[in-house]
Image (tube, coloured by chain):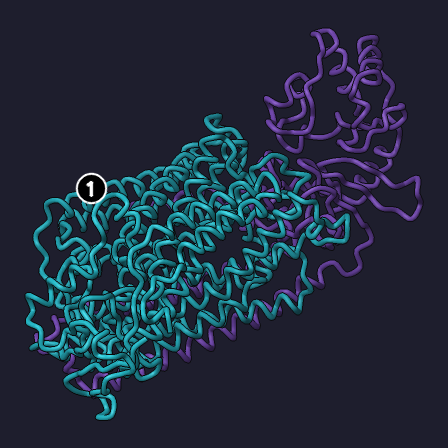
Chain colours: A cyan, B purple
Amino acid sequence: MSSADVTSERDLPPERATVTKGDLAPEQDGPRDSGMDDASLHRWLARTWRTPPGIVGALSSVDHKVIARRYLITAFVFLCLGGLNAVAMRIQLSGPQRGLIGPDLYNQLFTMHGVTMMFLFAVPIVQAAGIYLVPLMVGTRNIAFPRLNAFGYWIYVSGGAFVWISFLLNMAPDVGWFAYVPLSGPEFSPGKRADVWAQMITYTEVSSLALAVATIVTVFKQRAPGMSLDKIPLFVWALLVTSFVVVFAMPAVMITSTFLILDRLVGTHIFNPAEGGDALLFQHLFWFFGHPEVYIIFLPATGMVSSIIPAFARRPTFGHLGLVLSLIAVGFLSFGLWVHHMFATGLPKLGASFFTASSMLIAIPNGVQIFCWLATLWDGRPVIRTPLLFVFGFFFMFVIGGLTGVMLASVPLDLQVHDTYFVVAHFHYVLIGGSVFPLLGAAYFWFPKITGRMMSERLGRWHFGLAFIGFNAAFFPMHLVGLWGMPRRVYTYPAELGWGNINLFISTGAVLFFLSFVLFTFNLIHGALKGAPAGDNPWDAGTLEWATSSPPPSYNFRRIPVVTNVEPLWAEREALPVATGLRVDVRELLVSTVAEAYPDIREKSATPSIWPLLAAIAVGGTFLYSIFTPWAIVWGAVPIAVTLVGWFWPKGDPEDEQ
Amino acid sequence: MKRPALTGFAMACVLFLQGCAGWQSALDPKGPAANELAWLIWFFTALCALIWVLVMIALAAPLLMRPRAPSEPLVLNAGAEHRKLRVVLIAVAMTVSVVVGLTLLSFFANRTLAAIGSGAALTIRVTGHQWWWEVRYEDATPNRILTTANEIHIPAGEPVRLLLTSTDVIHSFWVPSLSGKLDLIPGRINVLDIKADKPGVYRGQCAEFCGAQHANMGTFIIAEPRARFDAWWNDQLRPARSPASGEAKTGEDLFLHRPCVMCHRIGGTPAGGTVAPDLTHIASRRTLAAGTLTMSRGNLAAWIADPQGVKPGAHMPVMELNGDELNAIVAYLEGLK
């Protein structure tokens, strides 16, 4: 570490503006960006920060943008696979007593749909959006712990491949994405299917935790000078809160899946009531994670909404502080409502009522968010572009999902609709309306930044129309069919119950909704190949990611910007003030203080390395092997230790020697 | 874009009216608990719809405004911002009061529901199995304890107490026209009180995913006037009828000498298995295999000949029977009224 001797042009207290040279001898110091002209600065930085060429180079990349792009594409592939699962199920359910898909395959399909959408699509894609955008939005050159970030991606891919290859081998989990015991226990799920579920959880949680840690540290320590807590963009706040929720929620599900593996593999009886274990313990542990999980998916989407609305309403968000506090409140409250998933298990009535109150309570901070966004839009007709259309769709559907959520929070009411299609409708309104629509809006919004090209606005509007109609046609009637008595997770239903017509209607909507994604994929590819050049800031938005070129260079910013406003680009129309003094011959970041973002020290950022991939192979292989024998942990420890030693081997830097 | 949405909405309305009257519907209540819940559902729905419409109006309003003057985005009108703050605060206050109101409403509704079972004279133990329901009528006199399967006869107009438990995985008992659902959890006993206002047949099914045949785990509550219910109970207590024909007699012999007896019980015969439904009066029931097939000679034969085709994954194994043997067993079971 070197203490910062970064010069910024203004807005820093005098004692901080120029810190004198630190403890390093001058001869160890290399060239700095101060006083260097733009062209040679670009040459230096491009050489220092580039991802090495060749396949090994690509596999060694630690650039947050490269990793995030891979994450986004992989998660999108999983979205399409999960969507295909859904279409297959909807074809089976389009009429009573259809024989297309039997129970064995159907139960795998709905489990794979849930697992894929929750663990392989929704959480990874919002976190990936975070690791792409957060370093750009806070004005730094790379994410914190870039190798951990790369490791996270490799673990995620191997987990996803593991569960999907299991599906192709007809050994996909068939116990639901929640895998309740005793059904998933050793007695009622012989074979390896439930183990695949449990171990897939381990993979995705490791990767999710890695990203959360990297995001938290990036937000706390790498913000551009001047970006004090009150000037952090809402998207970054959302990712910060989400990352904390991940850090506290994911261990609960790792414990759940590990206990399950222990019950299945080495014969512990943690969940076996016959041996003094408890079946409901599993549900408590699972939902202690499972409910925050919903907010892990939803909170980043609110950050996206908070980024899109100001750009098209042409003003900063109304109630910035209220929105930040709402995010934090939702993050806390999300840990206090898990029991509303368990009202039908026969809990004491007064205790259950407490969870009714806490579940309804979360409507308040979410209401605050909705009202602040609406107030932002009330300044005049906004500029209607595709990203904003998706935000409007978000309001339309998320409010429905939120209100049906209030219905589900009521214990007595929940007992009628719990585990019926009403709940299926509810959480698709929340997750697709509340998260996927903002994500689609975000895709249109940030696509120009990522690729340097615009997506087609015309196709975008068609895409929105098709997705909006398809979604509502597919999911709104599910409320009704649930109230008419149709439970979830049934592979067929008798004709005499009269659910046939409405299910056919639902299936038609589902196919339309799927087709909207085909159109979206076409628009993505078309935009990437033939889209109009975007320029740095096509929407004239105000946050820092728009200050650099599109796509951003490997080093993100030629000079580290100095932030004077929540919307720095609107506050500094001429040119952003910058801070200089970072070395250009090695990867160096500016580390700033947590609250005020004063420049504090200069810190090295990790160079590309193949070790994260090798470590991921060792860890992934151990996880895979461990569904067969507990000895895998013993044998797997060896390659894991070797790769971690390689990863952290001192490189002989003066810093390491100290 | 608006048109198809409207058409879709209209279609949804039509479908809604079509499906409202069902024998397994939360919107077609036939008992005090379901009545209370249906009222609660309609109240919440109406209030939520109202809130949703208000939010949509607030969302549509800016679309009718003139575009914002092309001034710098950071230049805001202080007076307007202040007015907005007031509106937002009022909206938040309204949210708080709605949330508190609904919490109280839900709490008192729960108390009303809890009072329904008071004074229940009849206790029935319902045990969930993969994928059928064991139904045992409790009585102080041991020889009046009755075990049957999948169909629950109750006296109409009287509260009945159900003790719910399971011996394998978690199931959930749900007959929507009578009451909300409650789980059957191994190692625990949950208590659900139900009451049917009028005689009738009310369908229900398992609502917690319980494995391969979760979809075919139906149950029927048959509410009858008290006298008919008592007669039914007495009738069910007698042992199985002896075979009426030679073919049925052969069927009985086959049943008793094949693996059938390992799992099934037939009162008055040596068949005493308890892991599968009691067949003493199987022919008096409406359906086979927990609501999967209606009771008929043909369906009995189909179920015995090919249980894995009818209900794939069910625990009933395939028996090696020739045509005559199958006919004989069906003839015997058909006589077990």
Name the residue carrying label 1.
A522
- Can I make out residue A338 in this image? yes
Front-most of A328 and B181?
A328
Residue A15, compared with residue A631, is above or below; it is below
Q: Position of residue B300 (x, y in %)?
A: 68, 20
Left or right position of A344 against A289: right
Q: Residues within 10 Å of mark 1 (few under 14, many from 20)?
A: few
Q: Position of residue A612 (x, y in %)?
A: 38, 52
Front-most of A113 and A381?
A113
The count of marks equals 1
Q: Position of residue B156 (x, y in %)?
A: 73, 47
The amino acid sitting under disc 1 is Phe
Q: Chain of mark 1?
A: A
Left or right position of A85 against A253: left
Q: Residue furthest bottom?
A: A14
- The part of the image, by quadrant, that contains residue A220 is bottom left
